[in-house]
Amino acid sequence: MFDPILKIIEIAESTQDEARKLALSGSPAGTSIVAIVQTEGRGRCGSKWFSPPGKNLAMSVILRPKMEPRDAPMLGMLFSIAVADILDKLCHPFRTSVKWPNDVLVQDKKIAGILSEGQITNGCVDFVVLGLGLNLNSLEEDFPSNLTESLTSCSILTGLTFNLREVGMSILIRLRELTGRFEIEGAGFVPRLWQRRWLHKDQRICRDGVEGTAIGVDDDGALLVETPDGSWVKISSGEVCLQRPCPEKKVFNRDLPCIEKS
Ligand code: BTN
């Protein structure tokens, strides 16, 4: 369990770096940094994360979990569940879903992305920094024109404007509940809970030449894919694209194009 502490700063290159500095100087779990303006936001798989100044929630949270390093990726999944639970309330009646490994979607459009970074020493997790980019108050004209089809925001969905601190705190409180459960029960419940929001089961996916049907998520959070010859492949990291948009080279992860089948 942790006490949520939310610090808002005017500008940061990346809130991930700010949170990492705080973690290295001993800040407790639950310490979070929100930047009104983020100039060098990072996304997953080496992509850049663009956020229009002052509009969206760019937040990084420090966690100090007592867990095996192999379980650390589950925290990203846990965070996506916390975010989805809060978005269900903010964007009611829209239902929030997830895309493997931890994108958050509404109406099949990305509304939030999560980046998990951390430090391990001698096989022990020192800390994890969970970064959240949530499209909160952005409008369609704020998105790069090639991404308007694949992105959405809370304001686009509801016509309302949201307070960064209030939304950040709600997410932290839900994350605290879920990490508390994690400490008591272990990681087992995470893939089960996550899959309740997963709409891509049985859909065709492709990644790095692997093509097949997404059949589930394993106990360790890896994506299980059944290939055309009937064998199962486990995908543990990286980005997958749904077969449906793949031939048109649809971008899912901001500037990271999905992998195309030749
Ligand atoms: C993704 O690629 O989907 C993950 C995006 C994560 C972006 C957030 S914004 C706050 C935090 N600071 C960063 O530099 N990145 C994360």
Image (cartoon, grey):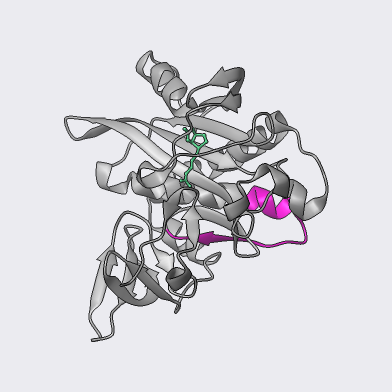
In this view of the protein, which residue sits in the foreground, 231 or 182? 231
- Identify the residue shown where x is 46% and y is 26%: 29
Relative horizontal placement of residue 231, taking residue 219 as reference (left or right): left
Relative horizontal placement of residue 207, taking residue 129 as reference (left or right): left
How far from the left and from the top, in percent, is residue 204? Answer: 41, 77
How far from the left and from the top, in percent, is residue 135? Answer: 64, 44
Q: Is residue 181 visible?
A: no
Q: Is residue 99 magenta?
A: yes
Q: Quadrant of residue 137?
A: top right
Q: Which range is magenta?
A: 85-100
- Judged from this view, the residue extending furthest toward the right is 159
Numbered disc total: 0
How far from the left and from the top, in percent, is residue 224? Answer: 32, 70
Q: Is residue 174 visible?
A: yes
Q: Quadrant of residue 241?
A: bottom left
How far from the left and from the top, in percent, is residue 117? Answer: 36, 36
- Identify the residue shown where x is 75% and y is 33%: 163
